[in-house]
Image (spheres, rainbow, N blue to C red):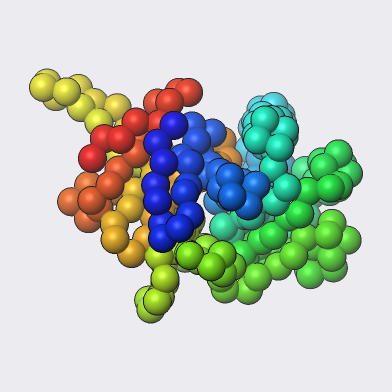
Amino acid sequence: MPQVRIENTTLELLPEKAIYVEATKTIIVADLHWGKTGHFRKNGIAIPLNTQHADETKLSKLVKRHKAERLIVAGDFFHSHANNETDGFAHWRTAHKELQIELVTGNHDILPKEHYSAWDVLVHDTICDEGDFVISHDELQNSDKFYLHGHIHPSCKVSGNGRMGITLPCFCMNKQKMAMPAFGGFTGSKRINPRHYNGIYIIAEDEVIQWK
């Protein structure tokens, strides 16, 4: 898979819409929106039950495959107020009790702090400083370091010689920052302008391909 070097740290870009840092055995993801499908169903919108389960399974497989010791969420871990799906996170946490979990709060992370304490989740209000880079949810106005962020759910339209094209989730970066795709399967995306980035890595099923 493609790797990006930030100072002395190598970031491996994964098709599961995650980043792996081997040096610290850390998985980094953004915008899981855990509990979003339950929120919609609670408001009378029919959403398949297996959507949330698929995200949980994908995350578990990532942690197991890489033997990760840490999980950092770049905001919007949970979607809204507590529901059956957010309560169900306690079971996922129990199955991964040795995993250190850290959250950089996003605009959707509105659960009471007592929830995070009970789940043994370390919360960072603005950034998580990883030494060679920092992790945030929103884009930062002023940062002395390169940063990874979520929030915008980036995607890019890829087309050939004709007019047909397909829009795919992507990692996109410039010299200052990298925007991460949304990990959650029920999040939607925002098409980015490729001219604003000097590096774009699209996710095509089980591959990450450098497109720009």
Viewer can see residue 107: no
Residue at the spot 40% in from the left edge and 65% down from the top edge: 146
Q: Position of residue 38 (x, y in %)?
A: 71, 42
Q: Residue furthest front?
A: 8
Outermost residue toward the left in this view: 161
Residue 105 vs residue 8, the one in the foreground:
8
Residue at position x 65%, y 35% in the image: 66
For residue 63, say whether it is visible: yes
37 to 115, vertically: above or below: above
Left or right of 155, for residue 205: right
Looking at the rendered structure, the number of numbered marks drawn on it comes to 0
Residue 189 is left or right of residue 211, and the answer is right
Relative horizontal placement of residue 165, taking residue 207 as reference (left or right): left
The vertical placement of 45 against 179, above or below, is above
Q: Which quadrant of the view contains residue 143?
A: bottom left
Q: Quadrant of residue 164?
A: top left
Residue at point 63%, 52% (across, down): 24
In the rendered image, residue 70, in percent from the top left (x then y), is placed at 70, 51
Front residue (pair 194, 65): 65
Residue 166, given in percent of the width and then of the height, sits at 29, 27
Q: Nearer the viewer, residue 62 or 181?
A: 62
Identify the image quadrant of the C terminus: top left
In the rendered image, the vertical position of residue 151 relative to residue 208, given as above or below: below
Q: Residue at x 65, y 47 (%)?
A: 25
Q: Determine whether 78 is above or below 189 in the image.
A: below
Q: Position of residue 88 (x, y in %)?
A: 83, 43
Quarter of the image where one finds residue 147: bottom left
Q: Quadrant of the N terminus?
A: top left
